[in-house]
Image (spheres, rainbow, N blue to C red):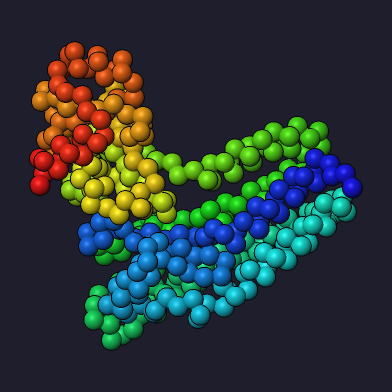
Amino acid sequence: MKINKKQILILSSLILLSLTFFFPIWKIDLEAPQYPEGIGLRIWLNKITGVNEYDLDNINKLNHYIGMKVIDQESIPELKIMPYIIIFFILSGLMLMFLNNKLFSATWIALLIIVLLIGLYDFYLWEYDYGHNLNPDAPIKIPGMVYQPPLIGTKQLLNMKTTSLPDTGSYLIGLAVIINSILLFDKNKFISKSFSFIVVLLLFNFCQKQPEKINYNNEDCASCQMTISDNRFGAELITKKGKVLKFDSIECLVFYSENFNQDEIYSMWVTDFSNPPELINIKDAYFLRSSEIQSPMGLNICAFSNTDSLNKIKNEFNGNIFNWEELVDLVKDEWH
């Protein structure tokens, strides 16, 4: 049996839905001075996990002090229902491939969108319940204070910055909806063909863990806790779980990474001194230390994406060229 391009796109959308079993659909990240590396939750179709091994336990301990209920996946029936809902849409979606019926397609899309909206509202209700219905005997009680996390976005709760956002699973579902919507309304097929290419690119990007833009003067260094302010020296470490840690200087990145679990490091990035705030992978970077260039933490290290820029600055400010391994030794000698 020959499968046409439309059927291939529908099948692609169903594969995206299937992938939601392997990625969290929502994430909640917490940042506080006592957790400089941050802790967080990942909500999957059928479970709730911590970003790191003990994150869920630590969050429940924090919740205990303010009287919030224990986060126990066994008490959340939606986690038992959601896998079956996705399976239903995958199986019914297979019929889309062969029926070529617009009414059926529209119904399938509408139902999936309605389910998503109901799910979002249900999530809000759970957050409201956790944030408002507090144990009156909690060790910490602040009159009038509630602890409901944001539905989408960031909110400060006492000393904890809480960020709640859709995770990969939600984007996969959204892509499935968009693909089938375009197939339904795109009469000349141009958008469909273009979109298939975009989907491939997006799927490729899903597999990549990319650095984030540093919000200078508003974010703190994960190592020294100082505000990241000079956009010529910012740096990042990305963990294999996708968490992005930011630093105010290359020396802070080196120091932090050497005291971090090496097996958990996915990649490290430094700012191109000649083209800030562009970030470059340390594997592609050239490093210069010059006493005439003042970095935030005083070791005066800067990075470049190419030797032309490196030599130009070296000729102007003097200094010594380092590779990454030599930088590690330098920071160890200077800071230990």
- Please tell me which residue lies in front, 53 or 92: 53
Q: Is residue 290 left or right of residue 303?
A: left
Residue 54: % across, % down: 35, 69
The answer, for residue 151, to whether it is visible in the render is: no
Question: Where in the figure is residue 166, as x and y percent of width and height?
Answer: 50, 56
Where's residue 210, x and y in %?
Answer: 43, 41
Residue under the point 69% across and 33% down? 194
Say which residue appears at 24% left-offset and 28% top-offset: 287
Q: Residue furthest bottom?
A: 137
Q: Seen in the image, is 208 located left or right of residue 114?
A: left
Q: Residue at x 20, y 35 (%)?
A: 327
Q: Quadrant of residue 63?
A: bottom left
Q: What is the quadrant of residue 299 in the picture?
A: top left
Q: Is residue 162 above or below residue 4?
A: below
Q: In terms of depth relative to the viewer, which is nearer, 94 or 64? A: 94
Q: Is residue 42 above or below residue 215?
A: below
Report if residue 286 is visible in the image. yes
Please report the residue visible at 38 percent of the width from the left and 59 percent of the height from the top.
29
The picture places residue 2, in percent across and down from the top left corner, at: 88, 44
Give whichever of 269, 296 is nearer the camera: 269
Count of residue discs: 0
